[in-house]
Image (cartoon, helix red, strand yellow):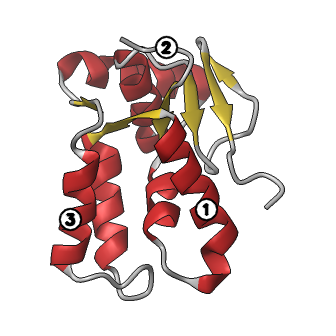
Amino acid sequence: MPNASTAFVDTNVLLYAASGRAADAAKTARALELLTNQQACLSFQVLQEFYANAVNPRKLGMTPTEAAAWCDAWLRCPVASLGLEAFVRTLELVRRYQLSNWDAAILAAAQQLGCTIVYSEDFSHGQDYDGIRIENPFRGL
């Protein structure tokens, strides 16, 4: 059951948490802090996006085994499946807010898990989508 320390995390939070790049050090520390101090909720979409970016040589450049190990660790978190109900809600959010399908699916998954906060740097900080507030955890870093 969600509580005050429960939040949905977008792919960029996971990517920064796993980044070993010196240029990402501040964001890595913040991402790890969030994932340690919050009950992180995810979706399969977020995990798939993480894996694809993690193994990309121009992104994190991990081996498939390394990326899968990170995904295995995050499978301990509540993970929203993107079934029919989430798909219908995604389409509603696309129409209502003129979002991309992928962004709307993030919000639908967060709503499915009962989260009221989404940590992401890909949305407008402070925006509210039907009771789901966006927070950019990397603002000012």
Give me the disc on residue 15. none
Residue carrying label 3: 69
The location of residue 33, given as percent across then percent down, is 57, 49
**Sequence-wise first label, 1 or 3:** 1
Q: Assign a secondary structure to mark 3.
A: helix
The location of residue 66, given as percent across then percent down, is 23, 75
User: Quarter of the image containing the N terminus?
Assistant: top left
Q: Amino acid at mark 3?
A: Ala
Q: Residue at x 19, y 54 (%)?
A: 72
Q: Residue at x 65, y 32 (%)?
A: 134
In the picture shown, does residue 141 fall above or below 75? Answer: below
Q: Assign a secondary structure to mark 1.
A: helix
The location of residue 116, given as percent across then percent down, is 55, 18
**CA separation in Å, label 2 and label 3:** 28 Å
Give neighbour class at mark 2: few <14, some 14-19, many 20+ (Cα, 10 Å): few
Q: Amino acid at mark 2?
A: Asn
